[in-house]
Amino acid sequence: MRLSSKPRLYCFTKTRFSRLESASLCTSAPKDAEALRIASILTKDDWKGLLQTSSDLESKLNPEIIHSILLQSSVLDPKRLLWFFNWASHKSPNPKKLDSFSFLALTLCNSKLFPDASQLLNNMIRTGRPVEAVLGSIISCCKDYEGNGVYILEILIDCYKKMGSWDDAVYVFLGAKEVGVLPSLVCCNNFLGDLLKLNKLDLFWTVFNGMIDAKLVPDVYTFTNAINAHCRVGDIEKAKRVLMEMEEMGCSPSLVTYNVMIGGLCRAGAVDEALKLKNSMAEKGFNPDAYTYNIVIDGFCRENRLPEAKLMLAEMHRAGLNPTPIAYTALINGFIKQGRMVDAFLVKDEMVACGVKLNVFTYNSLISGVCKAGDLEKSKALIDEMVSIGVEPDTQTYSIMIESYCRHGNFVKAHELLEKMKKRNLKPTIYTYNGIISGLCHSGDLCRANNVFEAMIKQGLKPNVILYTNLMRGHIQKSRFEEARRILDRMIENGVMPDIFCCNTLINGLCKAQKINEARSVLVEMVNRGLKPNEHTYGAFIHGYAKAGEMEAVEWCFREMQSYGIAPNNAMYSALINSLCKVGNVNEALLTYRCMSEKGVLPDIKTHTVLIHGLATNDRIDDALHLFSQLDEKGIVPDVYTYTSLISAFSKLGDMEAALNLYNKMCRKGIAPNIVTYNTMIDGLCKVGDTEKAWELFNEISQRGLAPNTKSYTMLIDGYCKSGSLTQAFLLLDKMASKGVPPDSFTYSALLNGCCKEGEMDKALSIFSEMMQKDLASIFSFNALIDGLCKLGQPNEAKRLLDAMIDTSITPNHVTYSILIDHHCKAEEMEEAENLFLEMQRRNLVPNVVTYNSLLHGYNRLGRRAEMFAHFESMAAKGVEPDEIIYGLVAEAYLKENNLIRMLKLLDEILVKDDAFDKKSSLLLLDAVCERKNFPEVPKLLEEMAEQGLKLSPITCHKVICGFHNKISPEEAERMLESLIRFGWVPNSTTLNSIIDEDNDVANSESPINSPKQATCGVACQV
């Protein structure tokens, strides 16, 4: 027989089994007086009374006597023997002989008292003797005494199965087979079915191979089980081979067989093949039933082929079959997976119209969908609806809601639901706690997440690998890698083995934090535990090395992964291209893109989207558009992410016309925008001040079956605040609350800024108080409020707020101090400004150009130029680069002081950076240095500078010479050049004419008449 099978786990050799057969069975126990006396009592009518009144009987009982009594042929009633055996077992503390159990069980089976035999064999197993001894005793008994060994062995197998001792049950099966006592085909098929249900596939194939070795002819149930086992592991080819072989052997498949095969094909993604098999069933005399249609509909939904799923539902109606909730729920899940909630609810309406009652699974799918879309109000309405029609929420219903509230940061409501769940006698599951712990980790509250984790364990729930992984991820996101590692170690200690996804989570976090050596250590441990790295493992390393610019290490990753049989794929290359773009290495990203085809990997839509996004975010929008335009030629259909990448780029550039054109084009092509698309558009429109169009798009979100999230509301609120429409902003905040969308720190900060800008400080303070209560106050909100108070002339209140900030463990930053310093400088309160400036530095906060700008302007207004110049000089010492405003301010101060040496130094400093600044400051200084009245002093100053080891840059030397040439005389310019050559500041070969000619060339090139028109950047032949 050519049936496909798996390797065996057991191998019974003759030597091994001979020991089993030779187990002692004493059949020649002496019929002593006591055994005969007790046996004679058992033949009497009042035997029970006689046994119980014989006071000396109990002391005589021992395993040998009991066994002898059982063997007495005078006692014909097996039930009487069983009663006596149980009574004697209770009276005698000595363990009974296994042979006694075996003999009595065989006797009961011969009398067809199978339930009694089953109970006896259960007691036999509970003696704790090994399965080898139990089986050896029974087989020896069957050989020595008349009786059907098949029944007793089938019951023994069943007993081990009911106890969950599946390995022992398989041992009995194989042991019986070796001595030629084979359980019936019905027993074998049931055994196979039970192993399949428990997914014990290794044991399944052991039993199956045993059946084939024993020449037991399989029937339709055997074949169907074998097909199911192959399908379970996705081995569709072997499953199809079994189906073909059973037909060749003359065994006709049943409707169940076809359904199992169709289900396997659908789960493997081969829906078209499943459909073909379904259509061929009629030729074999079978009509597909509701279960068949349910499987195919679910298969189409899994593959996002919803139109075909709907057609299959219609065909089901035409076939006279009433679609079940299973079929409708599969379709609902398909629409939810695509984010098409409107269509999902249309299917629900169709169910109701067709008289199909919604069950808890259908409601759970809908509740899960609306929760994922962020519409918690709708989810509560669905729960009320299901209760009203008599469908009780189950553990899954509550778990979905709890997880959703936690994801939105509403832990108070989540706790209320958890308590309500317990009151309804619904026990929280691992899934319930996973939702709570994941939500707490996402919100950064790792302390509470750890506490919930410990509480869950105390309640007797054992965390699984998913929960451990989520807890690890929470710590990784906070860069608490040591704690994440401890969680991994604890997980292993508790017998939960990490899977590849768990290890990848830690590796990915370490690589992102540039702790690549530690990530390598985790990889080595992972391989040592027998886990095989996958493309995601190496994708993390590739991303980490590319981010660090270590391209040689990237190449090493590609080589090593190939040694594990992992071929570089689109996801790998996409990760590499994405990493290169993020660090600004766009040319290397383009080179990688070109190399893909050479390596036999054709870039897919994800790769193109990553590259388009990378080009756009690196200011190469024309290149991004060109690559986008090539997609049609390559037969690649852009998706929502491709369009959103370009829409985002144009929105950030403020080109909302281009962004809207792309949005409209996407919609015309039938590509539904997602929430990211809408948020990007709303943000862009608000930034250009078009809140009306932003509001229009905001309303469109719900019309598309999506739900605005916190980001959607926050962007529009920020837009209203910046445009001075505080009323609309607060109305939108109220709408957020009514929809169950929690405001975050950014939402409140936007309102706070808006109120401060409009001078509504009472409202601002009220918002700030609410933020403090919700623990949402941040450095940004403190800074906004301090700025508002300063602008309203309330610096004391602002200072008190600064002290309060420190008390709440929120550390002030350089912006905080710069705001306060700026206010005091404008109020000409320089002592207070200086005190804050010193306090700022004591806190190790480095003043920036804004801070110095305020101080320099403050001292300049008061005419205190010495302090002004001192701060300017300290900027260089602290590594703070002056901007144009500061250079202009200091230049004017030097001119007023007529300090030529400082003017020359400042001129030199500015000219070196001339490309970055306008010419105003340098021209002012140059004119002052080259004025006739200063002419006698300049050569002396230059001599002093040279003697002190100072020097001017070549560009400054050239400018000064040109200034002398134009304002004094060519002769003085020539003498100046000779001095500069002598100082070694310009080359010996430099001539006055060469300097003048160069200056004229520069002037001509900068002339508006001669400058070429600005050309639009073309697309290089790079993509």
Image (cartoon, rainbow, N blue to C red):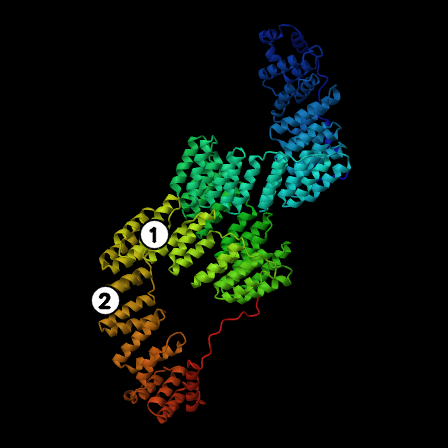
Taking the spot 56% from the left edge, 60% from the top edge, the residue there is: 608
**The one of 757 and 794 positioned closer to us in this rendering:** 757
Taking the spot 39% from the left edge, 54% from the top edge, the residue there is: 715
- Residue 888 in the image: above or below residue 397: below
Q: Is residue 55 visible?
A: no
- Residue placed under numbered mark 2 in the picture: 830
Q: How far from the left and from the top, in percent, is residue 591?
A: 58, 66
Marker disc for residue 24: none
How packed is label 1: few (under 14 Cα within 10 Å), some, or many (20 or more)?
many
Which residue extends farthest bottom? 971
- Residue placed under numbered mark 1 in the picture: 729
Residue type marked 2: Met
Q: Earlier in the sequence, mark 2 or mark 1?
A: 1
SS label for mark 1? helix
Q: How far from the left and from the top, in percent, is residue 725?
A: 32, 55
In the rendered image, the quadrant that contains the N terminus is: top right
- Residue 132 in the image: above or below residue 723: above
In the shown orientation, is residue 617 left or right of residue 199?
Answer: left
Residue type marked 1: Ala
How packed is label 2: few (under 14 Cα within 10 Å), some, or many (20 or more)?
some
Q: Is residue 1 visible?
A: yes
**The one of 439 and 379 positioned closer to us in this rendering:** 379
Which residue extends farthest top? 45
Q: CA distance from mark 2 to mark 1?
A: 38 Å
SS label for mark 2? helix
